[in-house]
């Protein structure tokens, strides 16, 4: 779970993987579908500097960048099926799967390489 700058709550779910948004400031607020994935679970969430939601999945090991309108773009496909944590640095999102002691990933968008140790 994570909050955006407007105070709305975003909840990662599974079966199938999705992200729901709730405006907790409204007394009768109900969750609304924000992003739906073909993956089995969305496991982790983080925000980048531009206000995009970064989500890691379980199923095919995908990392998504989700814009304010809920449109997702796959940034990275892991060699394993699960992304358990995502961190966002100054240059964008990084992942380090629990099984990895070292990893080098390449961003699908700009083709930059990031080494994780």
Image (cartoon, grey):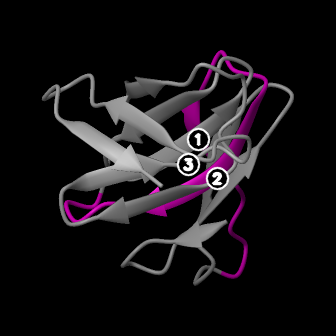
* Residue 84 belongs to magenta span: no
Q: Rounded to the nearest whole Å, what is the CA distance between mark 2 and mark 3?
A: 12 Å
Residue drawn where x is 58% and y is 70% of the image: 2
Q: Position of residue 63 (x, y in %)?
A: 49, 34
Q: Which mark is on residue 44?
A: 2
* Residue 35 belongs to magenta span: yes
Q: Is residue 80 left or right of residue 79?
A: right
Q: Rounded to the nearest whole Å, what is the CA distance between mark 3 and mark 1?
A: 11 Å
Q: In terms of depth relative to the viewer, which is nearer, 6 or 94?
A: 94
> Which residue lies under the disc numbered 1?
56
User: Visible in this render: residue 70?
Assistant: no
> Outermost residue toward the right?
15
Secondary structure of residue under mark 2: strand
Q: Is residue 47 left or right of residue 42?
A: left
Q: Mark 2 or mark 3, which has the lower sequence index? A: 2
- 101 to 71, vertically: above or below: below
Q: Mark 2 or mark 1, which has the lower sequence index? A: 2
> Which residue lies under the disc numbered 3?
96
Residue drawn where x is 64% and y is 42% of the image: 100
Q: Position of residue 21 (x, y in %)?
A: 59, 56
Q: Rounded to the nearest whole Å, what is the CA distance between mark 2 and mark 1?
A: 5 Å
Query: Which residues are the magenta region?
Result: 27-51
């Amino acid at each position: 779970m994570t909050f955006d700058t407007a105070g709305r709550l975003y909840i990662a779910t599974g079966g199938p993987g999705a992200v729901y948004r709730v405006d907790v400031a409204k007394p009768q607020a109900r969750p609304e579908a924000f992003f739906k994935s073909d993956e089995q679970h969305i496991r982790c969430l983080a925000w980048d500097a531009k206000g995009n939601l970064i989500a890691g999945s379980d199923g095919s090991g995908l990392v998504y960048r989700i814009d304010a309108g809920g449109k997702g773009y796959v940034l990275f496909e892991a060699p394993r099926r699960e992304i358990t944590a995502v961190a966002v640095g100054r240059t964008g999102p990084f992942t380090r799967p629990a099984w990895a002691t070292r990893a080098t990933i390449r961003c699908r968008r700009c083709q930059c390489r990031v080494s994780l140790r």
